[in-house]
């Protein structure tokens, strides 16, 4: 998975005739992760860091790390109530962002990730696919920006490669341009 | 470049949707209520429980779309009667409806599914919750259960005491909880 992500990042740097500058930033984000069609898992908080890298105008590659704490699920069986721990997940991956607009920017994105899921009786890593859309804008301080994103994270179900676990993720982030270099 | 920004995310999303449609799946909760109570006799006798998953609506509704078993638990209150020595309980499994009558027969013809779970000398009660139970499954037995789920939906669970128990151990309000990975 890490190899695929690195190859994808490298491929973007090789797009012909468009390289102008490289900007590397750092970002922190937090929000909520909402399981979709998962009867045994519940909504919980998520947070993480991103490193947006602009190799070409209007396209950014963004490695990230995220931590999700799944909420517990209550269920009644044979008249007794039970609580199942939610699924906690550590994710590492990279998204590719396609930016539209200036000022307030709209950017759809897609990505790949490796997701380590844990709870009692579960300790497994699976591939995930991300896609979503974000709105970003500059804050009144040089290099500082903020964004809000809505995304779907589709991760292969450890029980079957033909099924998936899905989360809708709503996050708010703050970023800062750490490094900028113009390429002649 | 503008076209590329729309084309790539659309292509990625199309690839995901076309990838065996793993996105159109979910995790469905179902439970099978065991005989109440399940009277687990002292060895060499056993308690057979024929489980017909077709009697569970959530299973029957998804039977032709099952892709795997995402989670499972055997839950209930395990009650050791007064005077009974400390002991432990295991659950073994055979496909279909069978009628083995002794522990030796179960060991010879069935596969360990779950356990052991220990219980103190009577009178004592031990509640087995979902999180504790999920850790006690045995891979080969779980695979037999998955195969039964994907097949006719019938298996036999054998509840046995291990050790030198001379007393009946009851499981009150027992159930088998299943989280089925199924297509939508």
Image (tube, coloured by chain):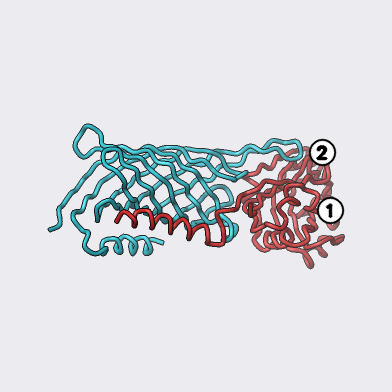
**Badge 2 is on which residue?**
B82
Q: Are marks 2 and 1 on the same chain?
A: yes
**CA neighbours of label 2 inside 10 A, class few (<14), some (14 to 19), many (20+):** few
Q: Measured along the vertical axis of the image, is residue A72 above or below residue B153? A: above
User: Which of the two residues, B66 or B37, is positioned nearer the viewer here?
Assistant: B66
- The answer to whether marks 2 and 1 mark residues whose Cβ atoms lie closer than 8 Å is no
Q: Nearer the viewer, residue A46 or B58?
A: B58
Instruction: Report the residue at 34% width, 54% height from top.
Output: B5
Residue where numbered disc 1 is placed = B47
The tint chain B carries is red
The residue sitting at the top extreme is A140
Would you say B54 lies left or right of A183 here? right
Chain depicted in cyan: A
Query: Alpha-carbon neighbours of circle 1 within 10 Å: few (<14), some, or many (≥20)?
Result: many
Q: Is residue A42 visible?
A: yes
Residue, far left? A184
Q: Nearer the viewer, residue A92 or A155?
A: A155
Q: Which mark is residue A86?
A: none
Relative horizontal placement of residue A51, taking residue A90 as reference (left or right): left
Q: Position of residue A151 (x, y in %)?
A: 44, 45
Q: Quadrant of the C terminus of chain A?
A: bottom left
Q: How far apart are labels 2 and 1 at the CA level? A: 20 Å
Q: Position of residue A19 (x, y in %)?
A: 21, 58
In the rendered view, tell whether residue A14 sits above or below residue B13.
Answer: below
Residue A30, image x, y percentages = 39, 38
Which residue is rendered at x = 46% and y = 53% of the image?
Answer: A115
């Amino acid at each position: 998975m890490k190899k695929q992500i690195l190859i994808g990042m490298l491929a973007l740097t090789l797009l012909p005739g468009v390289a102008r500058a490289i900007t590397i930033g750092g970002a922190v984000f937090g929000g909520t992760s909402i399981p979709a069609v998962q009867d045994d898992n519940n909504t919980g908080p998520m947070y993480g860091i991103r490193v947006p890298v602009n190799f070409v105008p209007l396209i950014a590659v963004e490695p990230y790390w995220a931590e999700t704490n799944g909420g517990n699920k209550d269920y009644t069986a044979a008249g007794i109530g039970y609580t199942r721990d939610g699924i906690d997940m550590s994710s590492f991956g990279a998204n590719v962002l396609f930016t539209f607009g200036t000022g307030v920017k709209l950017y759809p994105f897609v990505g790949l990730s490796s997701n380590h899921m844990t709870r009692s009786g579960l300790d497994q890593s699976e591939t995930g696919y991300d896609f979503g859309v974000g709105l970003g804008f500059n804050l009144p301080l040089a290099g500082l920006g903020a964004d809000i994103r809505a995304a779907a994270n589709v991760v292969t179900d450890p029980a079957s490669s033909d099924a998936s676990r899905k989360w809708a993720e709503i996050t708010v982030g703050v970023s800062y341009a750490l490094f900028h270099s113009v390429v002649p | 470049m503008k076209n590329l920004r729309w084309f790539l995310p659309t292509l990625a999303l199309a690839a995901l949707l076309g990838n065996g449609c793993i996105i159109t799946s979910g995790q469905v909760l179902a439970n099978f209520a065991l005989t109440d109570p399940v009277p687990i006799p002292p060895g060499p006798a056993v308690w057979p429980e024929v489980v017909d998953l077709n009697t569970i609506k959530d299973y029957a509704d998804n039977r032709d779309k099952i892709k795997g078993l995402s989670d499972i638990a055997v839950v209930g209150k395990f009650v050791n009667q007064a005077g009974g020595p400390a002991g432990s309980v295991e659950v073994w499994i055979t496909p279909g409806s069978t009628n083995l009558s002794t522990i030796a027969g179960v060991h010879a013809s069935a596969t360990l599914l779950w356990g052991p779970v220990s219980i103190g000398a009577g009178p004592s009660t031990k509640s087995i919750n979902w999180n504790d139970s999920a850790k006690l499954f045995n891979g080969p037995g779980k695979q037999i259960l998955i195969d039964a789920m994907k097949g006719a939906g019938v298996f036999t669970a054998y509840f046995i005491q291990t050790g030198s128990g001379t007393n009946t151990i009851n499981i009150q309000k027992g159930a088998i909880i299943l989280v089925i990975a199924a297509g939508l």
